Amino acid sequence: MRNPAAPGAVTESAELVLPLLPPQDLAAVASACRALRAAVTAVTARRAADAARGLEPLPIPFRNCVDSKPYAYFLYTPFSLTRLAPGASTRSAQPWGAAWARPPGPTWPRPNLDGFPSAVCGCACAAAECGGTQCACTDVEADAAGPGLEAGMGSLRECGDGCTCTPSCGNCHTQRGVAVRLRVVRHLHKGWGLHAAEALGRGQFVCEYAGEFLTTEEARRRQKLYDELVSGGKLSHALIVIREHLPSGKACLRVNIDATKVGNVARFINHSCDGGNLHPVLVRNSGSLLPRLCFFAARDIVEGEELTFSYGDSRVRPKGLSCFCGSSGCSGVLPSEET
């Protein structure tokens, strides 16, 4: 005899399990029965509605009018983390697509970056007093000039975890998550790209490039693997190498951030040979010796416009990946770094 409560029980159980599954496992579950197929469809729709999984102040939906892919699957983090120790198990499954609404996760304080240098320092300002000459963490000259939008990579200094103020202080502009409306759009040749879903003003903070902080040794190991997978058409990676030359010119600070498996929506920002409409800025927070890479609008940006920046011009490989940026000065090949 058929149990009328069975479909409801299946749906209830599915809501607990399905949000933990990667796309290939979801597809396998959908073929089991009609009730599970409907549950998988609901989970897929909710995933496509917010790439950030409720971890940012605003949802960031996917939009695809090109093919049948409803979303890109990866683990989400609002801020950069250290990589797993060698031999450690993979990160726990991250629920994505559950029916219940979840408030944005806290982005303050940021996690302890075990294995990387840190410093215990910061200002003693009250929240309302940060900024300007009153705050020990403020770079007054950089503040007056803005985030260096004219040329090259800019720099800013902000309060951090070692400070007595709160995230609402006037010197924590880039630490409140993605507070502008964005969407992830599928392109015919470029794959996914990040677009503005509202008008953005010049100098407005857009997002941080979040992922896993890597040692140079690990970055080189992963880059070699990624190059092999990319050449076989099996991967589009998001490992970025930042080099900042010191005033002496004899050495440079190197920061490696990999958003291939664990990252935020900045992993979808595509390259533009003309420099793009986003300006990269290194932001230093008191209490941390590792800078963060943040993006500001390099000019006024209209709603619907794709967000892009230059990946660099240190090395262009003749047999590298094709560039489809469409700019008047497009080289036809994506730049790549020597890691």
Image: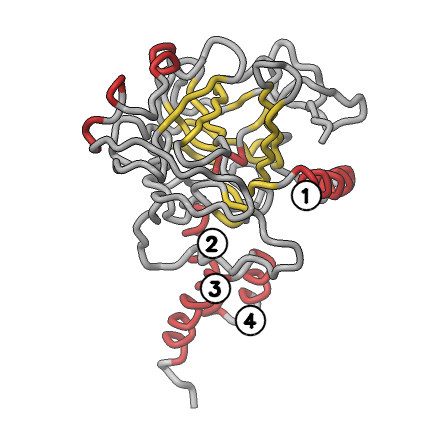
Mark number, residue 32:
4
Identify the residue position indicated by label 1 in the image.
Answer: 218
Quarter holding residue 246: top right
Q: Are marks 4 and 2 in contact (CB under 8 Å)?
A: no
Quick one: label 4, few (<14), some, or many (20+) residues within 10 Å? few
Which callout, 1 or 4, points at the residue further toward the start of the chain?
Answer: 4
Quick one: label 2, few (<14), some, or many (20+) residues within 10 Å? many
- Mark 2 element type: helix
Quarter holding residue 22: bottom right
The amino acid at mark 1 is Glu
Whole-percent x, y for residue 121 in the image: 37, 35
Q: Are marks 2 and 3 in contact (CB under 8 Å)?
A: no
**Closer to the camera, 12 or 92?**
92
Q: Rounded to the nearest whole Å, what is the CA distance between mark 4 and mark 2?
A: 16 Å
- Mark 4 element type: loop
The amino acid at mark 2 is Thr
Which callout, 2 or 3, points at the residue further toward the start of the chain?
Answer: 3
Q: Is residue 303 above or below residue 28?
A: above
Q: Rounded to the nearest whole Å, what is the CA distance between mark 1 and mark 2?
A: 33 Å
The amino acid at mark 3 is Leu
